[in-house]
Image (cartoon, rainbow, N blue to C red):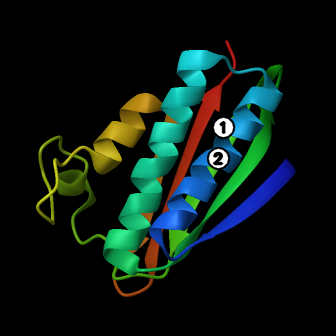
Amino acid sequence: MENESRVPISSNIDIVTARQHGRKLALELGFEGAEVTLIAAAISEVARNIMDHAKRGEIILANVRNGNKQGIQIIAQDEGPGIPNIPQAMQYGYSSRKGLGVGLPGAKWLMDEFFIVSHIGKGTTVTMRKWLH
């Protein structure tokens, strides 16, 4: 992983900081306008989930390569309560709080790759990638 930056998440200000770091890295990698906005939105969704469910965690942003493809990788990790039912959490409209229920499914839709691993009582890790086209 080249150009890795870590943003601790424990307040709303940290969500803004993570978005700013993500936008900066996306622009440096060559992403343009709308794609930069989508990446920032996906970062907001996963960072907001950390705040709402685990209270603290971190966003790790990095430049990634796969063969001749280059892109951005965003990892959101926490040591929160975990997600008991990932398929349910990934349904549009499902919300464990009084939100719109677009958090995780919305982030998945915005990115090219999306993986989630969660262990009850140990936390959740979401890994997302967006590739330059």
Quarter placement of the C terminus? top right
Residue at x-position 69% and y-position 21%: 31
Q: Is residue 44 visible?
A: yes
Residue under pointer 2: 20
Q: Secondary structure at mark 2?
A: helix
Residue at x-position 40% and y-position 71%: 51
Image position, residue 86 (x, y; %): 27, 59
Estimate the spatial distance between the alpha carbons at disc 1 and disc 2, rounded to whole Å.
5 Å
Image-based side of 82 in relation to 100, left or right: right
Residue under pointer 1: 23
Q: Is residue 1 visible?
A: no
Q: Residue furthest top?
A: 133
Residues under numbered marks 1 and 2 in contact, where contact means CB atoms less than 8 Å apart = yes
In which quadrant of the rendered view does residue 128 lie? Answer: top right
Q: Secondary structure at mark 1?
A: helix
Please, what is the three-letter code of the amino acid marked with disc 2? Answer: Gln
Image-based side of 19 in relation to 83, left or right: right
Above or below for 119 versus 112:
below
Above or below for 94 versus 31:
below
Residue at x-position 21% and y-position 64%: 85
Image position, residue 35 (x, y; %): 56, 22
Image position, residue 37 (x, y; %): 53, 29
Along the line of sight, the residue nearer the viewer: 41 or 104 = 41
Above or below for 84 versus 5:
below
Above or below for 58 versus 87:
below
Please, what is the three-letter code of the amino acid marked with disc 1? Answer: Arg
Count of labels in the image: 2
